[in-house]
Image (cartoon, helix red, strand yellow):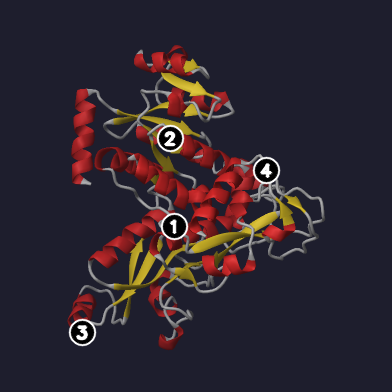
Amino acid sequence: MKKILTELKKKEDSGDKICIALIGCGQMGSSIVAVSDNYPGLDVKLVADLEVERGIEVFEEIGYKRDQIKICNQRDKAQKALEKGKVVVTEDAYLSGKIPAIDTIVEATGSTEVGAKVAYKAILQQKHIIMLNVETDVTVGWLLKNMADRAGVVYTVSAGDEPGAVMELYRLARTMGFQVTALGKGKNNPVDYYVTPEDVKEEAKDKEMNPKMLCAFIDGTKTMVEMAEVSNATGALPDLPGMHGPKVDKEDLNKKFIPKRDGGIFNNDFVVDYSTGKVSPGVFVIFTTDSEHLKQNLSFYSMGEGPYYTLFRPYHLCSIETPVSVARACITGEHTINSEEFNSEVAAIAKRDLSEGDVVQGIGSKDVFGRTYSYKEAQEKNTLPLGVSQNCKLKNEINKGELITYDDVELDSNSFVVKLRGIQDSLKD
């Protein structure tokens, strides 16, 4: 981080700041604009959102006047506006990759369809792409990461979200030579698999959130996606479909999030899971060591008597940390976390009784929620990945709580993420 801070300060002093385009100006996206204004050496200069007024408002919040904000959907006009020191607001999610002045793109829509297309185009146009959209990465991230590597640009999931924060602890533990046995996060409420956007409409309004987004948090989908991301980055697997999700407080994590043979709950030795106890908004890594000398040291440093120990990060700052991933990508060429392999899959589960002919509305809807499976088991069961469930048409009746398979649906043939997933599957077969 010292090198990154030094280089950012140089960019600030020289006026050669990293120019960022933000795609999606919802709760998370608007925070990125606000916090980037505090970071040295980088600026959000373009916001893409279907609600243009949201982009205008967030630029006004950090001091821009209306005459300094250019509203347009054309590349040349946007480029000229940026050259004149103005900022740009556009309805076109795919415009930013065409603009020479843009250095990197942050995707924050939460839509796998938009996220896949934005990332794909950014890579083709040799722009770094930072995904505050884990849903896309657990669906087609392996392909996008490989494309980016070959194009010489950085494709990465953002710092600040739980997967990035867990990865930080995991790398620390592995660098110190410890054996990691579990990686996890806290969930701040019990899972309600069958909650609908209508059920949370008022709460979402109070929190200034999209009801579907809030629904995806409460029904567990976001947790499934986040821990699948950690699995795909590290090789750890869910111990069982959907994970355990026990109510365990921080001080007992290293007593319960361990193998059964040592008094814990896991059948396997290297797992991803989550707790609904007093852990959120923290993340954790459970590790062990065979060294008696290190066990004595860990006891001396108040890590407990072992044989399992907890590395704990009591916070994750979501979009506030996203610019760290931007700086890391542009300055050092490093990524934060990616689906290096597909170890886990988030499968679609029926949230209600679905009839033949029903069109599924995807993540956070009244129709489906996500459940994490090992990729091997998902392949054996032919599960429908949640990330391609949007607008698929049911060919069979599916009962509430049942797993949806590829055989049960007719996929949306016009969907870009469906096409990209098809390419990815053909390459991994």
Q: Which residue is tagged 3?
A: 292
Q: Which residue is mark 2?
A: 124
- Mark 3 secondary-structure assignment: helix
Residue 14 lies, in percent from the top left, at 20, 24
Looking at the image, is mark 3 or mark 2 earlier in the sequence?
2
Distance (Cα) linking label 4 and label 1:
39 Å
Q: Secondary structure at mark 1?
A: loop
Vertical arrangement, residue 288 with respect to residue 223, above or below: below
Q: Is residue 218 left or right of residue 166?
A: right
Look at mark 4 in the image and give the residue it sits on. Answer: 413
Q: Residues within 10 Å of mark 4 (few under 14, many from 20)?
A: few
Q: CA distance from mark 3 to mark 4?
A: 59 Å
Residue 388 location, x and y as percent? Answer: 62, 50
Camera-side mark, 3 or 2:
2
Q: Which of the two discs, 2 and 1, sits closer to the camera?
A: 2
Amino acid type of disc 4? Ser
Residue name at image x 54 percent, y 49 percent? 423
Please tell me the numbered disc located at residue 281. 1
* Amino acid type, label 2: Leu
- Single out the mark in the foreground, 3 or 4: 4
Q: Secondary structure at mark 2?
A: helix
Q: Secondary structure at mark 4?
A: loop
